Amino acid sequence: MHRLLRLAHCSDIHLDSDYFGGDWNRSRRDRDRAQFEELLTAIEAREPDLMLLAGDLFDHNRASVETIEWACERLAALPFPVAMIPGNHDCLAENAIYHRHDFAAAGLHLLLDPDGQTVTLDALGVAVWGRGVIDHHPGHRPLADPPARPDPRLWYLGMAHGVHVPAAGESRNSSPIHAHEIEDAEFDYLALGHIHCARDVSAGATTAWYSGAPHPVLGEPGSFLSVTLEPGQTPAVTVCRVPPTAR
């Protein structure tokens, strides 16, 4: 029997954006960290059972060790579990952050299998599937053939990072996520990343959203999503605004 489940869905945080060391752009690094703190404070206030981070925690695989360790510590300190995938910026290249640092040791559920990976959180009655980005190109299909629901007693959540393609057929976009793939999936909720504004791309019986980014975009405040799953009900999705940092 499914229980009521509250989710926080975020993505595209881009820590260490354009930071290569030195005082000249340290303020930008600090601004990104401050915005991440604002995001986590806003998420904690919603008291979710689980946080889904759908890619691009870091802006690139050159992020500093200091920033990586700081981010791990901050996420590990949250009072709820975190499941996450790599995005196109922090992709699973040979020099990937996720190959060099042990996120599992920080208690984070990092889904790294290039073919997709499922983690089961028995205490929450949840199975989470995700496929991170290895190489951001048109041949990469983030949502191609996800596995069927592993257990009807569990909520089934998905995570993917790429560009939504509303029409059937081919796309020149890198990492395309087609509407028919969303419709064919068996997820109770699909958390998407890559688009920096909140967007509903649900199809068929699958509720699917982009969370947006925590930083302001084109004059609009940053965002994350608060999602409530309740047995017998369509998932309730609320767009939550993230206060802009004063830095």
Image: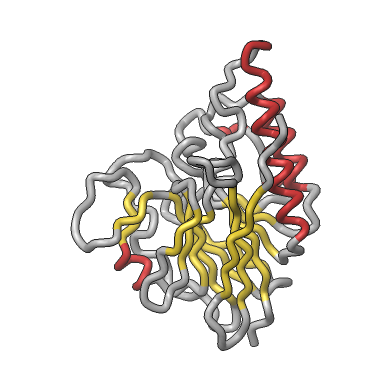
Q: Is residue 204 left or right of residue 213?
A: left
Q: How many marks?
A: 0
Q: Position of residue 7 (x, y in %)?
A: 65, 65
Is residue 61 placed above or below 5 in the rendered structure?
above
Return the residue found at the far front.
219
Q: Is residue 41 left or right of residue 85?
A: right
Q: Position of residue 12 (x, y in %)?
A: 54, 43
Task: Quadrant for the C terminus, please.
Answer: top right
Which residue is drawn at the image coordinates 59% and 46% (left, top)? 221
Q: Position of residue 15 (x, y in %)?
A: 61, 33
Which residue is drawn at the image coordinates 73% and 41% (left, top)? 37
Residue 91 is at least partly visible in this image: yes
Q: In the image shown, does 241 or 17 lie closer to the viewer?
A: 241
Is residue 186 placed above or below 32 in the rendered structure?
below
Which residue is drawn at the image coordinates 68% and 11% (left, top)? 23
Q: In the image shown, does 138 or 167 lie closer to the viewer?
A: 167
Residue 98 is at least partly visible in this image: no
Q: Position of residue 175 (x, y in %)?
A: 34, 47
Q: Quadrant of residue 230?
A: bottom right
Q: In the image shown, does 218 or 138 lie closer to the viewer?
A: 218
Is residue 118 placed above or below 184 in the rendered structure?
above
Task: Quadrant for the N terminus, please.
Answer: bottom right
Return the residue found at the far left.
169
